[in-house]
């Protein structure tokens, strides 16, 4: 394997991870990864099953003498969030991920790394390959479309799995055992575009907001990071409030429903003399945003860029629709809406203003809200819907997925805690996560299932700053090995 990460220890995990990263990530990236897993399984003569939506199960025979042990499911997902910085030329359609070692971390060059959830899949494959691992019968369950709406888990055919103990390998914190997660739902809000010709003598300019940290809309929402769509909207609103004659051509920002927007761009038309005043507004906003976000967004960049005039920039929003759009983007909530009353430090409810896209006849706004309390989830959806309707938009609320209610008395949870404490000498932190793990849906599909979730230290998933800590992958693999031996 040419990747430098393949030589890291435990080598069996990193070699599998490097091979996964080598696979290109076209629009249906999980199918390429699924083929990779199927080819590996068939070479090992493991039985493979797939259901109608593409979920994949690899059945791994037990270690000799442990055939009568209960079947354990090792679960992860096949897809990843393909994000890159605007100045990076990497083509996910034809190229794999270029990973490199940075001290005790592995990261990618200008793109997401795919440790979410490639490192989990690599660990499951390593367990099946490693003759030193003692285990009962295993089922490696690899689901599709986790990142785009948990589709695979929602539509799993439960007949392809027989186990009723599941170790989810998709959390991102060393030294923690996760026993619960939030539910969530997406909303698509569509505002009609009504245009008129731009003012005679006006010129097009592009407002750019970039350099933000972004991140996972569940894991990182508590960090109070900047939202590029919100910041771009605030700049436009301030410019208009200060009397600038500014016409809007388009606004675009964000790319994934579950990623905090790192970049946003607004193309406007204005008189040549107004450009200097807009630069002054930009400077004032830059100072305000620096004061507001401080060290949370050290690379924040605001810029005005020249745009070549063409037919697409000659037509602008009429005043009423421009005001409706700005009011919609300003009014939609973003960030933490409530903290848990039961679990200290856990976000209970949040919303991510995720994507805005200007199309020929509409502006599409995508929001993603989460909560560990279902009534609060539905109430947040009602709030978002009301804001959209009040601004003349059409609102489509997507079906919500359930959370995973914590169960401290779970036998699997208790065994995982005991094994971790014995292995590392300290009791792990017991946590729930404000993100959409597949456990809630999978437990709903397979009544009687017991579950726990563990993983290594992964930071900034869903952004080009994603990293996985090398030393914690070793701890993670040791824990999985020891837990499987205990269950065998």
Image (tube, rainbow, N blue to C red):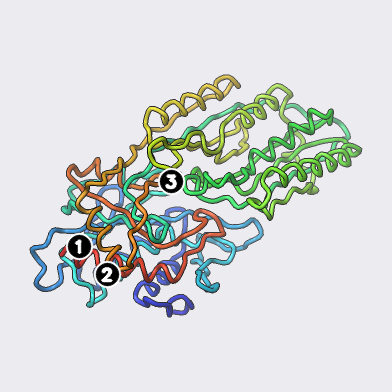
From the viewer's perspective, tell me whether residue 277 is left or right of residue 392. right
The CA distance from mark 1 to mark 3 is: 27 Å
From the viewer's perspective, tell me whether residue 421 is left or right of residue 69. right
Q: Few, some or many C-alpha atoms within 10 Å of disc 1 (few <14, some 14-19, many ≥20)?
A: many
Res. 368 mark:
none
* Mark 1 vs mark 3: in front: 1
Mark found first going from the N terminus, 1 or 2: 2
Above or below, 110 relative to 204: below
Which one is in front, 357 or 184?
Answer: 184
Q: Quadrant of the N terminus?
A: bottom left
Q: Are marks 1 and 2 in contact (CB under 8 Å)?
A: yes
The CA distance from mark 2 to mark 3 is: 28 Å
The spot of residue 362 in percent (x, y) is 60, 31
Instruction: Name the residue beneath numbered marker 1.
Output: 138
The spot of residue 281 in percent (x, y) is 82, 39
The CA distance from mark 1 to mark 2 is: 10 Å
Q: Secondary structure at mark 3?
A: loop
Instruction: Name the residue beneath numbered marker 2.
Output: 127
Q: Few, some or many C-alpha atoms within 10 Å of disc 3 (few <14, some 14-19, many ≥20)?
A: some
The spot of residue 54 in percent (x, y) is 30, 52
Mark found first going from the N terminus, 2 or 3: 2
Q: Few, some or many C-alpha atoms within 10 Å of disc 2 (few <14, some 14-19, many ≥20)?
A: many
Instruction: Name the residue beneath numbered marker 3.
Output: 148
Task: Look at 84% across and 31% down and name the residue there.
Answer: 244
């Amino acid at each position: 394997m040419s990747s430098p990460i393949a030589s890291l220890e435990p080598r069996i995990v990193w070699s599998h991870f490097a091979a996964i990263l080598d696979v290109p990530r076209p629009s249906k990236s999980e199918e390429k990864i699924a083929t990779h897993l199927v080819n590996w399984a068939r070479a090992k003569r493991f039985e493979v099953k797939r259901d109608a939506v593409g979920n994949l199960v690899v059945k791994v025979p037990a270690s000799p003498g442990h055939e009568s042990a209960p079947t354990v499911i090792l679960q992860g997902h096949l897809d990843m969030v393909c994000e890159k910085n605007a100045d990076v030329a990497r083509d996910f359609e034809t190229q794999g991920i270029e990973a490199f070692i940075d001290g005790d971390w592995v990261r990618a060059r200008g793109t997401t790394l795919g440790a979410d959830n490639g490192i989990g899949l690599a660990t499951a494959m390593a367990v099946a390959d490693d003759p030193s691992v003692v285990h009962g019968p295993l089922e490696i369950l690899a689901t599709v479309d986790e990142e785009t709406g948990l589709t695979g888990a929602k539509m799993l055919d439960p007949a392809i799995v027989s186990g009723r103990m599941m170790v989810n390998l998709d959390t991102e914190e060393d030294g923690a055992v996760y026993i619960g997660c939030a539910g969530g739902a997406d909303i698509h809000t569509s505002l009609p575009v009504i245009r008129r010709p731009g003012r005679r003598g006006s010129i097009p300019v592009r407002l750019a907001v970039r350099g933000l940290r972004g991140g996972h809309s569940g894991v990182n929402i508590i960090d109070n990071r900047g939202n590029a769509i919100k910041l771009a909207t605030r700049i436009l609103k301030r410019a208009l409030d200060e009397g600038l004659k500014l016409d809007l051509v388009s606004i675009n920002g964000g790319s994934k429903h579950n990623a905090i927007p790192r970049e946003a761009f607004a193309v406007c038309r204005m008189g040549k003399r107004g450009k200097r005043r807009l630069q002054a507004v930009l400077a004032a906003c830059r100072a305000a945003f620096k004061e507001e976000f401080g060290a949370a967004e050290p690379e924040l960049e605001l810029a005005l860029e020249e745009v070549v005039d063409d037919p697409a920039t000659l037509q602008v929003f009429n005043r009423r629709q421009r005001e409706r759009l700005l009011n919609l983007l300003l009014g939609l909530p973003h960030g933490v809406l409530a903290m848990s009353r039961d679990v200290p430090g856990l976000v209970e409810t949040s919303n991510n203003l995720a994507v805005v896209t200007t199309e020929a006849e509409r502006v599409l706004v995508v929001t993603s809200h989460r909560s560990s309390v279902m009534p609060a989830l539905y109430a947040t959806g009602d709030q978002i819907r009301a804001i959209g309707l009040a601004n003349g938009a059409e609102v489509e609320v997507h079906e919500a997925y359930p959370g995973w209610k914590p169960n401290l008395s779970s036998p699997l949870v208790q065994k995982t805690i005991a094994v971790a404490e014995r292995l590392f000498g300290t009791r792990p932190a017991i946590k729930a996560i404000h993100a959409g793990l597949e456990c809630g849906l999978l437990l709903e599909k397979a009544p009687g299932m017991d579950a726990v979730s563990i993983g290594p230290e992964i930071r900034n998933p869903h952004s080009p700053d994603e990293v996985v800590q090398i030393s914690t992958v070793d701890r993670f693999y040791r824990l999985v090995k020891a837990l499987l031996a205990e269950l065998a």
